[in-house]
Image: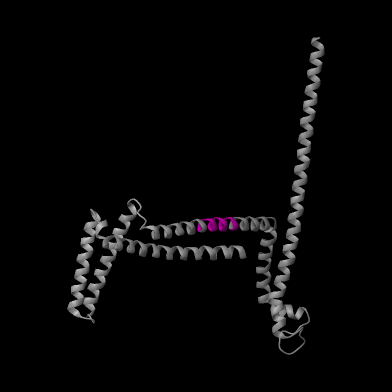
Amino acid sequence: MIEQLVTRYETARLELHRRELRRREEAAITRLGEKTLADAGGRSGRLASLATEAAATRGRMRSIAAERGESPPAATRRRLEALERQLQQIHQTAGRLVLAMPPTGAESEVLAIRAEMADAASEQDRLRGEGQRMVEETSSRVRAWVGPRAPALVTMAVAWLIAHGYAGSHTEAILTSFGLSPHRRGSHLVSLATDTFLVRQGLPLLAAVISGYLAHRLAARAQAAVESVRARSGQASQAGTAGTRSTRDALDRRAVEKSR
């Protein structure tokens, strides 16, 4: 049980770690794209157009900031935030393009984070498999324990329900039959509250335990009887088979002797 809890805790911890690694990966890709677009000699094709878009976006941001000063109103802040998200998307697109190109060494940070993510995913899969194995083992143990005791457990449950209902509706009569008072005054084993609790909870539990024990013994005897009958039947069948074979062998020997 403790091992299962520890395994689940480690699996949840690794899931949180993977989420943090994904966030770090996005940030590293964004930095890679920003650095690539800032390098004038390393831009060509799609990267060149992304650099132009990034420069235009930064220009609009500077113009908006210059118009409103240091304390822009809410509408201006929303425009700036939208342009910042647009610029971040441009940098991410550029970073992913760089990752799809032949390696140059600039993508080492992203690759290191991805390697760490792969290790975390592998460890998480191992823990999940181990947790599933523990669950299956526990389930098999429970079934192995409950199977032979199923008649006793069912009998206990039924007996407890019947006895509990009877004790709850006939508490005073049961107390009186034991020579105890059903009122505050009179003789009590401990007190009225304790005696009532024992009658309503203790007696049904005792009846359930006794009934379950008897049911378990009866089921064990019935199972032993069935196995004994099967064993005798098997022995009789083997004896009959052996007799048939011996008779057949004798007839074959007689036939051979006559032919001679």
Query: Residue, x 43% and y 63% (percent of image)?
Result: 21
Looking at the picture, tell me which residue is in the foreground, 109 or 217: 109
The quadrant of the image that shows the N terminus is: bottom right
Q: Is residue 172 left or right of residue 134?
A: right
Residue 53, image x, y percentages: 21, 62
Q: Is residue 228 left or right of residue 140?
A: right
Residue 202, image x, y percentages: 71, 74
Q: Which residues are magenta?
A: 124-134
Colouring of the image: one colour
Query: Residue, x 66% and y 65% (percent of image)?
Result: 157
- Farthest residue toward the bottom? 185
Looking at the picture, tell me which residue is in the foreground, 141 or 70: 70
> Which corner quadrant of the image does residue 203 belong to?
bottom right
Looking at the picture, tell me which residue is in the foreground, 233 or 71: 71
Q: Is residue 8 magenta?
A: no
Looking at the picture, tell me which residue is in the foreground, 18 or 128: 18
- Farthest residue toward the front? 41
From what the image shows, is residue 222 above or below residue 211?
above
- Farthest residue toward the top? 260
